[in-house]
Image (cartoon, helix red, strand yellow):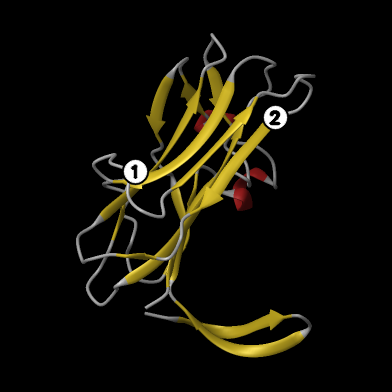
Amino acid sequence: MKVKGNLNVGGAVRSTSFRGALVWLTDLFTTSLGSDNSRNVTLTHNNNITISWVEAVYDTDNFWNATAPTLFTIPDGVSRVRMSGSSNIENNTTGLRQTLIRNGDNTPFPGMSSDKRAASASGSFDMTSGGGTAIISVSPGDTFIMRVFQNSTVSLELQAVDDTWFAIEVIE
């Protein structure tokens, strides 16, 4: 199934056909554009944590399945994709924050995404980390995950807010 509709590009409205998926930890329609703290993910010190997503905002080709909530799985008929992700981690002044997009078996691949940032010096705001892959060749059945890392010396929460998400876009 393709999403059809209009896309506003630089003020010009164009008809489009889009394929892809966007998953996140929260349902903003039930949390009134706020955080659903019960869906936060604890990020233990010095560990890469694979994120289990709660809900698909959209999913045109069944990339995501709630029974395997950590994975995007490539369906038949898809040969190139681009992925992106964002993680909002609770405030702290120590260590690094990193968001990684990897193959489902956690191996690196050409064009992968890895965004590493130092913690906020003031500690007064949450740290958002994210990035996107290059356009990559894929085969049906390939899987991809998003992992988040922090090394603040204590456990921190990955916030279940609107800027914590994982997306995939079909290029061809």
Front in this rendered view, residue 60 or 104: 104
Viewed as shown, does residue 11 lie left or right of 53?
right
Q: Which residue is mark 2?
A: 126
Residue at horizontal 50 percent and vertical 38 percent from the top: 99
In this rendering, is residue 159 above or below 153?
A: below
Badge 2 amino acid = Asp
Percent position of residue 87, x then y? 56, 39
Viewed as shown, does residue 13 lie left or right of 165?
right
Residue at horizontal 64 percent and vertical 81 percent from the top: 7
In this rendering, is residue 96 above or below 88?
A: above
Label 1 to label 2, Cα distance in Å? 23 Å
- Badge number at residue 70: 1
Badge 1 amino acid = Thr
Q: Secondary structure at mark 1?
A: loop
Q: Residue furthest front?
A: 110
Q: Residues within 10 Å of mark 2 (few under 14, many from 20)?
A: some
Q: Residues within 10 Å of mark 1 (few under 14, many from 20)?
A: many
Report if residue 74 is visible in the image: yes
The image quadrant of residue 111 is: bottom left
Residue at horizontal 32 percent and vertical 43 percent from the top: 108
Q: Secondary structure at mark 2?
A: loop
In this rendering, is residue 32 above or below 118?
A: below
Percent position of residue 74, x then y? 27, 63
Quadrant placement of the C terminus: bottom left
Percent position of residue 18, x then y? 48, 78
